[in-house]
Amino acid sequence: MKAEDGGGAARLPREPCGKPAGSPEGKPVGDPDSGDVAGVRGAPGESGGTADREHRRALSLSRRSSALGAAGRHREALAASEEALEITRRLAADDRDTYLPDLALCLAGAAMRYVRLGRRHDAVDAGREAVAVRRELAEARPEEYLPHLAGSLNGLACDLGRIGKPEAALDAAREAVGIYEGLAARNPVAHEPSLAMALHTLAQRTASLGRLEEAVLHSTRAVSIRRRLATENPPAYSVAFATALHGLGWQLAALGRREEAIAAYAESVTIRHRLARSENAQAADHDYLAAVAGEWADLLMDAGRLTAAMEPLEIARTASLHAGDTERADRLAALMERAGSIRV
């Protein structure tokens, strides 16, 4: 019996999401929605010339795109992002030194919008160009732009994975981790959160190639960093910590290390369950909790621990109701009834 389908052959849990939404680590330095515009030229005075007016318009469109994206209006967000990108391309063509940072930011924004709308190949094209631009910037001013380059590489790794290019995705993820490791060695407070994010991505990309032992090593590092960060600042890092635990649990389960996987899932669900009871919880938070709790229940049932599986099944059922998925909630309730009869 499986929590997802109410029965059938054993299978691995689904791979967890790559970016920990709702945490600072989901928005690396230079991300268009992070509010970080370091290295981007500030808006000039109102008395500027044509280029200044165009620049102000591009900045306004970028901010509008971020606001629309946050509101779930992704098509409108993309339209604003593409217009900002078009303007910035023209500006950079005329004055590359001044406007190249803006071009990189607009490319990163467009890549994000394409992903939201399922235009994965367009996202990769924009992401590759963003990496090329930021690599050029980082070569000239590494202290300022290396974090931006690493962020773009991490995003590109995720995008390449989505279009079935695992080797290229792994290369990008490795480079991102290498950059963040160097940055974190010099300034851990500033860069360890991003290093943990990149390690999580690298673990996923490694696992996608079947190299699970290596993936577990990367995930273990990500969990270790995020555990410490979440202990120091729970509101900022608990979601990221739970996501890292989920990834580690998935990889351990794939290796057949069931008891270790169960422990990782249990801790991840405990955190997610607590967060889902907060006033700020959204339907997506409950949906994610339902999925992860269901995977935890699957592992317990595969181990013959039906009594222990009742707790995550009930968490998954309740979370499904909060997410508005009554069909899944009904399936889980039926599964709990059947599992209960087997226990007796």
Image: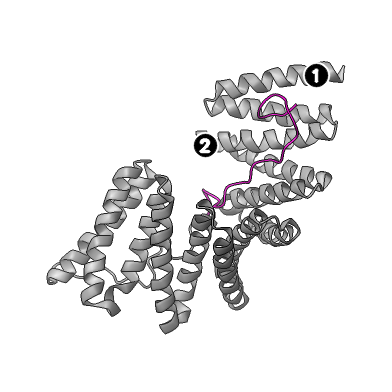
Q: Earlier in the sequence, mark 1 or mark 2?
A: 2
Q: Name the side, left or right, on which 244 lies relative to 50.
A: right
User: In which image quadrant can residue 309 be found?
Assistant: top right
* Quadrant placement of the C terminus: top right
Tell me where residue 102 sits by quadrant.
Answer: bottom left
User: Disc 1 and disc 2: Cα gap in Å?
Assistant: 29 Å
The residue where tag 2 is placed is 284
Q: Quadrant of the N terminus?
A: top right
Instruction: Give the overall secondary structure of the magenta segment.
Output: loop
Check the image and report above or below for 122 versus 12.
Answer: below
Residue 286 lies in the magenta-colored region: no
Q: Which residues are magenta?
A: 1-24
Q: Residue at x 67, y 23 (%)?
A: 332
From what the image shows, is residue 269 above or below residue 154?
Answer: above
Q: Position of residue 47 (x, y in %)?
A: 12, 70
**Which labelled disc corresponds to residue 286?**
none
Q: Secondary structure at mark 2?
A: helix
Residue sitting at 51 percent across and 33 percent down?
Answer: 283
Task: Identify the residue position indicated by label 1 in the image.
Answer: 340
Residue lying at the far right in this picture: please name it: 344
Q: Nearer the viewer, residue 4 or 229?
A: 4
Does 6 lie within the magenta span? Answer: yes
